[in-house]
Each structure stands twice: as C-alpha cells, then as structure tokens.
Amino acid sequence: MTPTFVDAGVLIAAACGVPEVSERALRFLDDPDRALVTSDFVRLEVMPKPWYHGFKDQVDFYEAFFRPPEKYQSLRDYWKMPSRKRADLV
C-alpha cells in the first residue's frame, strides 16, 4: 500500500465538485492500494463551511471519511508508528 496524504482539495472535489472531478476524486479515495493519511487540520479546513450553511450531504460525506480509523490515519499517528510498520504500508 502506498501511504497517500489526502488534502482538503481532494475531499472538497469528491463531496461537491463537478461530476467528472468528483468521480475521479472518489476513485482516488476508494483505491485499495493506498493507505490514506490526513491531519486534523484538513478536518478543520473542510467542516466549518458546509456545517454553517447547512449542507448536510457534504457534512455527512466528510464525517464518513473521518470516522473509520481503518479508512485513514492521522498524520500524527502515522509518524508515531515504528518505521518498520510504516514500511509495511509502502
């Protein structure tokens, strides 16, 4: 598996981009050969606006992405792993 950092742009594109871009971002996020890594700062970047404006579909999408720990790892947790375990992700 390739550790891959997911930034806000990918999540925003998947949640509310034009159909072609959204589909491409969703394929990226669903790639079984990637170990998704992100940070709490990405969550802080994507959550406030749709929550404030009441865009429930977007909030639900972001919450679903950040909820399961097997789906992604916090960047902080990734660097706390022993190097040999990180190497297993590659």
Image (cartoon, rainbow, N blue to C red):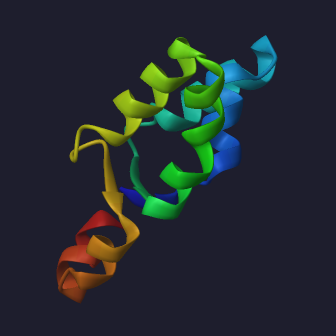
Horizontal arrangement in the rendering, residue 65 relative to residue 42 (left or right):
left
The quadrant holding residue 2 is bottom left
User: Residue 32, can we see it?
Assistant: yes
Q: Is residue 65 above or below residue 17?
A: below
- Describe residue 69's horizontal placement relative to residue 73 as left or right: left
Q: Going 49% across and 25% down the picture, which residue do you hit? A: 59
Q: Residue at position x 56%, y 21% from top? A: 58
Tell me where residue 3 sits by quadrant: bottom left
In-image side of 60 versus 74 (left or right): right
Question: What residue sits 53% from the left and 13% below the top?
Answer: 57
**In front of the other: 56 or 74:** 56
Q: x, y (%) of residue 37?
A: 42, 59
Q: Residue furthest front?
A: 52
Towards the viewer: 83 or 19:
19
Residue 52 lies, with reference to residue 8, above or below; the image says above
Q: Position of residue 41 (x, y in %)?
A: 52, 62
Where's the C terminus, which quadrant? bottom left
Q: Position of residue 77 (x, y in %)?
A: 26, 72
Task: Name which quarter of the figure residue 40 lies in.
Answer: bottom left
Quarter of the figure that contains the N terminus: bottom left
Residue 56 shown left or right of residue 50 in the figure: left
Q: Residue furthest bottom?
A: 83
Q: Is residue 6 visible?
A: no
Q: Residue at 77% x, 12% y: name it.
A: 19
| 57 vs 78, nearest the viewer | 57
